[in-house]
Amino acid sequence: MSNSWAAWLRDWDTQPFQLATKTGWDAFVNSPARPRPPDLTAVELRGMREDERADCCEARHVWNANPPTIRTPQMDHAFELMDQVLASARRDGDRLRGAVVIDAEPGQGKTTIATGYAKRLHRQQYRRYGPRTADGHQRLPVAYVPLTADVTLKGLNRQILRFYGHPTAQAASTTDLTRAVVDCATSCETKLLIIDEVHFVNLRVRNGLDVSNHFKGLANQIPATFLFVGVGLAEKRFLDEGLIGEERAMAQTSRRTTRCTVPAFSITTDAGMRAWTLMLDRLEAHLHLADHQPGTLASHARLLHERTQGRIASLTTLIDRACYHAIRDGNEALDADILQQVSVDHAAEQARRSA
C-alpha cells in the first residue's frame, strides 16, 4: 500500500544547507517552500497502520521544527536600516560604501535576519541582471563567510575563497590570496559580503588586529557592502578596532559602520505585548497537531515569555520540543503543562530560575 507520509519525507525531509559555499548558498536561496503535510484528525491518526503513523509523526516533527521566518518588529527595523546602508552600494567603485554590524546577544535571530535579507537581495539581483555577468562569470550577489575561533588573515582569505569555490594553494602568500579574493568578489559582482561569527576576532592579539585591518582593506578594494554579524561586538570594541581612550576617534570602522541591535521581546508595554502575541499567533498557525486549539499560545503569552525571556531562538526551541512531546505522547495538543515542563536551552532555564 502507498504511504503518502513516507513520500513526503523523501521529498521534504531536513535540508542540510551549507551556506558557506556557493553551491549550498544557491540551494538555500532557490529552495522551494516546503508544502504543509495534509491535516488530519485524531481519529484518522489512530486508524493508520503502525508504519504509516510512524512516518506521519516523523513528517510532522520535520514540519514543526521548521517554522517560517516571521517578520518581527526587530527584523523590520534591521531590514529598513540595511536598505538605507545598501543605498550607498549604488556609488561608483571609486567611492567608499558603508557597512552594517548586527550586534546582539545569542538567540536573537541575528543570522536569520542577515541571511533572510541576503536571500531577498540575491533574488532581486538575479531577476534584474540574470545569472551571468557581462563577462560571462557566474553572478554571486551574496557571499556568506562564517568565521572560526582564532581566525587568522590567511584563514579568513581561504574561507572567503572556499565560498567561491576557488582552488587555493596552501603555500600561497597573503598577498596572492587577497588578490584572489578581490578578483572573485569583483568578477562575480558580489554586492553583499556577510561575515558571521565576528566575535571570534580577538582584537587583543596580533592575529585579530590583522583581520580587523584586513576587513578595511577588502572594503576599499571590493565594490560591495560588508555585513558583520556577531555577539557583543560593541563590548569587544570591534567597531573601535580595539582602540581605547582618545585613539577611538581614529577608528575608521566606527565611522564607516552602522550598528544594528536586535533586542529581545518585552511585554512591559501594550505595544510589546501585542507584538509578542502576534508572533505567537503566527507560529501557532504553522503547527501540525491533530487536536491543537487555536489561541493556546497567545493565552499563555506570559508563561512563554517567562520561560524564554523574549528570545526568539529559545521560543522556537520550546514550541518545537513541546510539539514533539505532544505527538510522541499522543496528546496532539499543547497546554500549560507541556509548555511549563518541556526543557529548553541552558541560558533560558538559568535566567528563569534567577528571575
Image (cartoon, helix red, strand yellow):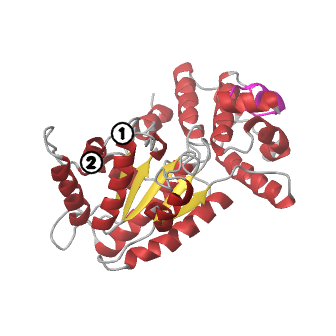
Compute the Cα span from label 2 to label 1.
Answer: 10 Å
Q: Secondary structure at mark 2?
A: helix
Q: Which residues are magenta?
A: 331-344
**Foreground residue among 11 and 24:** 24
| Vertical comparison of 48 with 18: above or below | above
Q: Where is residue 140 drawn, in percent x and y?
A: 29, 61
Return the residue found at the far front. 246
Question: What residue is disc 1 on?
Answer: 151
Q: Where is residue 149 drawn, in percent x and y?
A: 41, 35
| Vertical comparison of 187 with 262: above or below | below
| Vertical comparison of 163 with 97: above or below | above
Horizontal relation, residue 94 to residue 57: left or right: left
Residue depicted at x 47% and y 63%: 250
Q: Quadrant of the C terminus?
A: top right
Horizontal relation, residue 189 to residue 292: left or right: left
Question: What residue is disc 2 on?
Answer: 157
Is residue 323 something that shows in the picture?
yes
